């Protein structure tokens, strides 16, 4: 299982440097069974919310993480 993780990062960061630890906000989306569905559901999740267009100084990165690693990160 994969977890959709949406990172909202400052445009002062490069996309490679946009990680959970450097993001302005981290939003956990739905769980999916494979990488293709994770990407599609991540895009659909963003499209349905007010995340898009929050600020011109921010960008969104959708990441698909194994569910075990997301649960471990939430416990910290």
Image (cartoon, rainbow, N blue to C red):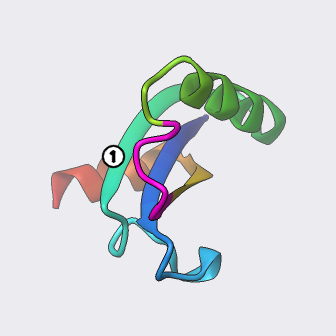
The one of 57 and 44 positioned closer to us in this rendering = 57
Residue 71 in the image: x percent, y percent?
33, 46
> Residue at 49% across / 45% down in the picture?
5
> Residue at 66% across / 23% down in the picture?
44
Mark 1: give few (<14), some (14-19) or many (20+) Cα within 10 Å.
Answer: few
Q: Is residue 4 magenta?
A: no
Q: Secondary structure beneath disc 1?
A: helix
Residue 46 in the image: x percent, y percent?
56, 30
Residue 66 in the image: x percent, y percent?
56, 49
Query: Which region is colored magenta?
Result: 52-58
> Residue at 49% across / 46% down in the picture?
6
Depicted 24 relative to depicted 33: above or below:
below
The one of 64 and 6 positioned closer to us in this rendering = 6
Residue marked by disc 1: 71
Q: Where on the picture, by quarter, is residue 8?
A: bottom left
The one of 34 and 26 positioned closer to us in this rendering = 26
The one of 10 and 69 positioned closer to us in this rendering = 10
Depicted 42 relative to depicted 6: above or below:
above
């Amino acid at each position: 299982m994969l977890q959709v993780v949406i990172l909202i990062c400052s445009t002062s960061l490069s996309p490679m440097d946009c990680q959970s630890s450097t993001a302005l906000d981290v939003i956990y989306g739905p769980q999916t069974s494979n990488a293709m569905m994770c990407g599609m559901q991540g895009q659909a999740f963003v499209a349905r919310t007010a995340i898009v267009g929050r600020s011109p100084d921010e960008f969104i990165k959708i990441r698909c993480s194994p569910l075990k690693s997301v649960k471990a990160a939430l416990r910290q």
